[in-house]
Image (cartoon, rainbow, N blue to C red):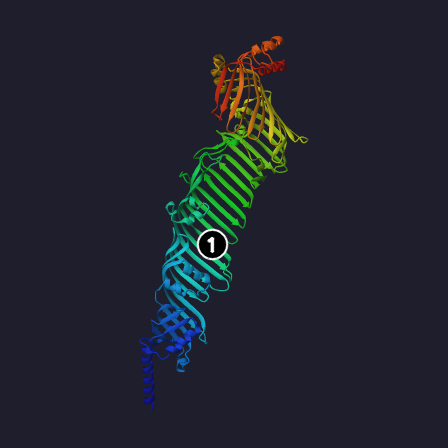
Amino acid sequence: MKKSIYYLIFTLTVVLIFFTIILATVGIESNKFNNLISKKINQTNNNLNLQLTTIKYKLDIREISLFLDTNNPKINYRNSVVPVENIRVYVDFLSLIKSEPKIKKINITLKQLDIKQLKKISINFKPSNLTSYINNKIIEGKLNAKLEIYLDNNNLLDNFIARGLVSNLKAKIIDDLKLEKTNFSFFADKTDVLVKNIFSKLGPIEITEGDLRLKLSSDFLIESNFKTDLKYNRKLKDNISFIKSFKYGENIDFLNASLKNSLNINFDNTYKVKKYEYKSNGKISKATYNFKKPLQNNFFNEKINELSLIDSEIKTNFNNQKKTTSISGKYSINKDDSQSFSLENIISKDLLNLKVKADYSKPLEFEIINYKKPNKSIANISLDLNKQNDLIAVNNIKLKDGNNLILIEGVDFDKNRFLSLKKILVKTFNKGKKNNDFLITYGKKIIIKGSNFDARNLPKFFNQKTEKKNFSRINKEIEIDFTNIIAPLSESLKNFKLIGKIERGKFNKISSKGDFGENKYLDITLKNNFENNKKYLEIYSDLTKPLLTEYSFFKGLVGGKLLYTSVIDEDSSTSKLKIENFKLINAPGVVKLLSLSDLGGLADLAEGEGLSFDTLEIIMEKNKDLLKLKEILALGPSISVLMEGYQNSTTTSLRGTLVPAKTLNKMISKIPILGDIIIPKEIGEGLFGISFKIKGPPGKTKTSINPIRTITPRFLQKIIDKNKKTK
């Protein structure tokens, strides 16, 4: 009996093992449950129609589960055929016996899917903009995928797992910019989509070692890490038009960079971006930017046509709170030697903070203080500023060049209008000697104080047009105290002191004095008459040349004393300049006039010892861009001149009369009756003189003369009047 039982158990065991081997390898074919399984699958999704051929029942030893396996089934999803290679349906064995199959899991292996097929079955994809993207943007590609579907006790979808490969994907991003040669693997379930091993090409950008995670929940999340190699040159400009849409993109000639990138984006349930962050770091091997309009200003002696970055490290962090960019490395200007630099730019909402440090080897000049940095010497320059809407706060500007130092702190502007200043410190050297050492502070008063100020170039700025409104918000008292001022022509002005008041950016009051030495002084006063809203300026100087160096009209003037008075209103001024007891030596304009007049002796004198003059008076009116020279009268023992004319930005025009012998006029003025006879008041004819005209653009005037002309009564009357005053 026992043997029979053992034999039965052994037989059943062998049969079970054999049956298990058959189920695990070959399987058992049957089509008994085809319609039942198709019906159950259709219940999970009524848009899905499954037609099965022969089914094999097999055993998955690893999962210790029975499954139904079929090849090349027909699946129709929304009237689109889905190419399926294999389906495995894992069922509860007991449920099969009861003819109520309970499906635990369905594994579907798709045949390689072409993009055209994917577009057909993507109609019901979620979100809808994903469907739109697939149909409108994706051009070509291949998809290999496996799908695991998990069902609950009611044979309804509980979860799924999709995995596969995408190869040779090509998609249109914008205009002529396409994503090409894209390959990646993916894994997805109800909560996440993971994309790995992303390799792609986007225009001049190669993407490598990329990964992407999509978190599918109430808050949609995208996380990605990838490397990019950017190789761009000017030849690609015509092929990639979107570059031209960037404000300065068209000016980029070359860009070669390698970056590591990370991206995080959070969406709400309407797929609106809630939060984002993009980080990158890497190296710019070379970048070249070509300015369409060369950069040029009064400080740079050379136009900047091209700016290049070389071997520079870059870090960026862009998020919905702020955008940070930092770059450090080497730069060069116009293909010159490279220098070190660092830059940090932070944008937070409407606030921008910019910090720059750089070595600078090009020539640099601040003409107003006569500072020149020679070519090839290395200066350290730093800048720190904030910008918020129209407000610009320059926290710090510093230039350090050997012993030279220029430091500016706390300068604020609103719509390019000056608001305030903390301080300016200047220490510079010229040919080894200190030429500037002063401090400007801006508090309750503007105080400018120092031991040295180089004013040799200052007269150049007197005639320059300035935007008065830039400083219209300055309303302060001012004090200036310089121990030594280096004036033009190497003159030295000692112990210069000035007190005054500025209102709306203009001087309303000045009282100043300086000492040239040897009992020679400079006095400047400015008073404001509030009743007629006019200002009265008076300048007296025992030396003339330092104040007149920038006016070509006075070239060759030596000696003399100067008195300048002016009545100034809002838009115009009436002025009078008087110079006494001076000489003209090597004055090109005068020499040319005398030569044309065939006054060789006087021309030789003007080129040698010089022509002496007792007085020169100029009466002028200035209105906007027009300077009207109402009268220019010069009286001397050898020659006297009376002129009038005008000057604007394009033309200088003068006409006048030259009298070779002032002594003759003196004799006539002493004989009143004879003077009236020789110079009839109505006819205006009499003594010999020379009429001339000077006209043309600045620096290119032409002179014409009429050597046979009588002296006008007006001229002689002026000479007589002046002689009376001198007596």
- Along the viewing direction, whichever of 436 and 579 lies nearer the viewer: 579
Q: Is residue 669 left or right of residue 301?
A: right
Residue 718 image position (x, y, % from top left) = 60, 16
Residue on which the image places disc 1: 278
The three-letter code of the residue at mark 1 reads: Tyr
Q: In which quadrant will I find the C terminus?
A: top right
- Along the viewing direction, whichever of 544 and 272 lies nearer the viewer: 272
Q: Quadrant of residue 445?
A: top right
Can residue 541 be seen at all in this image of the molecule? no
Q: Is residue 651 left or right of residue 72?
A: right
Figure label count: 1
Query: Quick check: 672 above or below 416?
Result: above
Q: Secondary structure at mark 1?
A: strand
Residue 654 image position (x, y, % from top left) = 53, 22
Label 1 neighbour load within 10 Å: few <14, some 14-19, many 20+: some
Residue 287 image position (x, y, % from top left) = 41, 45
Query: Quick check: 134 above or below 176?
Result: below
Query: Quick check: 611 above or below 203?
Result: above
Q: In which quadrant will I find the N terminus?
A: bottom left
Instruction: Name the residue located 49 percent from the left edge and 50 percent from the top edge.
Output: 324
Can residue 692 be seen at all in this image of the molecule? yes
